[in-house]
Image (tube, helix red, strand yellow):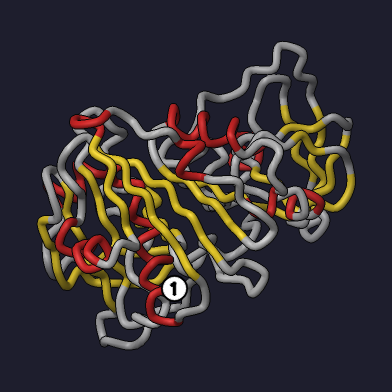
Amino acid sequence: MSARPITTVKTVVTDIEAAGTGIKLFTLADPDRWELPPFKPGAHIDLHLPNGLVRTYSLCNEPADSARYVIAVRREADGRGGSRALHDEVGIGDVIGVSLPRGGLEPQPRFGRYVFLAGGIGVTPFLSMARHLERTKQADFTLHLIVREEVPLAAHLGVLVEEGRIIVHRTSRAGRPDLAALVGKGGPGTLVACCGPESMIEDFERLTAVWPAASVHIERFVAPPPVIDPDAKPFTLSLARSGGEIHVRAGQTMLAALQEGGIDIATSCCGGICGACKVGWIEGKPVHRDRILSSYERERYLMVCVAGSDSDRLVLDL
């Protein structure tokens, strides 16, 4: 039984560039040099690596650059293996399947100013947005890049640094800057966004807790630890389109139950931050534990990797 087609696009690695200590830029293109599916600034793609791993990366290039996808990958020696595989095993000419792009930040007329806070390699999704705003002149922006010393992707950030659009804060010289001062007071016409280490994101979340949700955007590298609910009860998933039923055991994830039932679900982070396993829900009381869906989206969708249910029966659009 299949829930929905899992669409991947065949790409070939056309360039690999050293972009800082332990960082490589990978350029992916259609084998026949056709345009690739469109994307929003800073959107994500899942790479289906030759060793079977699936990993999510932000696109560094901007949407107008439609003939390629560019991702920056920092080699994590103690990571889950995706970055090591890309650095050590993938070369120019290799074929890699990628998902359709999802997420990102599409400029909106109501925002006349953007403030981006990036920690190290967390600059990648905002580089795409900065390039887009610089080209289109749709809004003003400032990107605060917090690093220990070395600037990642320095060759690609240089012009924006010289123009004062990117402000580099080196913690080895002056400590970590005051995030509140960087974020500012905001306002209805300002959007603030953050991507970096979890401690930085937690501080950012506290600072912006009273801001309108639509004015705050967060990108995460790593999924938070799974939430263990000691009072979890079994429930039933009713599949509206296929007519089937899946029973979820107490403490079992919705994703695991669906997979046991033969339902094909796209997955990547398995921690509620990448958006790969988004599924529509129709009836019931889902418990949302993801870090990516907006309050509006949660009225229609859930992330099956982390979502639970407060009702005995939950109807999914599958």
Q: Identify residue for label 1.
A: 133
Position of the C terminus by quadrant: bottom right
Q: Nearer the viewer, residue 278 or 178?
A: 178
Residue 292 x %, y %: 60, 46
Residue at (33% x, 88% y) in the render: 34
Residue 247 location in percent, x, y?
76, 33
What is the x, y in percent for residue 97? Answer: 34, 64
Q: Which amino acid does the dot numbered 1 rest on?
A: Leu
User: How many numbered callouts?
Assistant: 1
For this view, does 18 lie left or right of residue 262?
left
Quick check: 258 above or below 309? Answer: below
On screen, residue 24 versus residue 226, left or right, reads left
Looking at the rendering, which quadrant does residue 238 occupy? Answer: top right
Specify the farthest residue to the top: 230
In the displayed structure, would residue 112 be above or below residue 137? Answer: above
Indicate the position of residue 149 as horizontal and vertical percent values.
17, 38
Does 102 sit above or below residue 192? below
